Amino acid sequence: MPYSIVLVDDHKIMRDGISAILQRAGEFVVLGEADNGVDGVRICKELRPDVVLMDIGLPGLNGIEATIELLRHVPGSKVVMLSMYDDEHSVVSAIRAGARAFVLKRASDHDLLDALRTVARGGSYLSPQVSDQLLRRIQRGDLESKAAPSALESLSPRELQVMRMVAEGKTSKEIAGMLDLGLQTVRSYRKTLMRKLGVNNVAGLTQVALAAGLTRLPRPAGNDL
Amino acid sequence: MLVERERISRVLHDEVGQVVSAVGLQLELLRMDFESRAPEIAARVVAIQQSLESALAPLRRLTSELDAVPRAGKRERDLR
């Protein structure tokens, strides 16, 4: 019996290509697709797929945040994170969010099917380039040192999520809708994270978020390739 | 300056990188088609994929460098 899968990627050209490969392989049936994190979480809550293929760089909720949300509601689904980049921050954030695999978008040596098969059967997977890079860092001892904790590191994953959205100009009401939280809860998160960061307005919070790479400038419109 | 870096990084990632990667997926379908009945064609498809991949590698490096300024310290710290 084929495994069920949901594809979440804001690039239609990627979803179409992946869908065609999965169809050819015959081991997976695509239950649904989404082009943003909020819809991705909503569809997965409805369809409860075995596997979710999640792009890391999604508009709205990014792939990391969508994974946290999704697994909160559908813990049985297994997330495979798909990324253009193999930087350590992305890999570690994905794994911390609960992803079972991290696959690099490539033009050759596709390991996507291997990753999906492995995860569907209960395993974990890292693209060879990613695991090689981590191995080299472990061998150098880089992973053993511990940086001094910063105010940012004192924030919970949920507070980081709210911080990024506030910095991107979203209102508390919009954030509450996207994260399926009460308005008062979001206001409480805002108040707590501002206190922890020592800022007292949105401009200060945005500066911290930009400096930390938590958010980027707004995406241009018409980006669905 | 920061805005310009962001824009270039986004174009490279969202437009160039995704298209190159998606073309690679389409080539993968071709390779699967020809793998058993015409292995010599499948091998040529792999060679094209590898050429595309060699274009993606510097693109990844460049976008990482462009992203490095606002993210300074953050990526490194999070792995530790």
Image: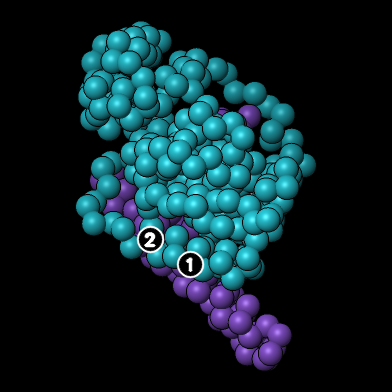
Chain colours: A cyan, B purple
Would you say residue B54 is visible in this rendering?
A: no
| Element class at badge 1 | helix
Q: Residues within 10 Å of mark 2 (few under 14, many from 20)?
A: some
| Location of residue A183 in the rendering, given as x and y in whole percent from the top left corner | 28, 15
Residue A62 image-quadrant placement:
top left
In the rendered image, which quarter contains the N terminus of chain A?
bottom right
> At label 1, which amino acid type do we have?
Gly
Residue pictured at 49% horizontal, 34% vertical:
A70
Q: Residue furthest right?
A: A139
Quarter of the rendering containing residue A23: bottom right
Which one is nearer the viewer's eye here, A22 or B30? A22
Quarter holding residue A22: bottom right
Read off the residue under disc 1. A17
Alpha carbon separation for disc pair 2 and 1: 9 Å
Tell me the tag on residue B62: none
Residue A12 image label? 2
Q: Say which residue appears at 24% left-offset and 51% top-offset.
A: A220
Report whether A170 appears left or right of A69.
left
Q: Is residue B38 above or below residue A44?
A: below
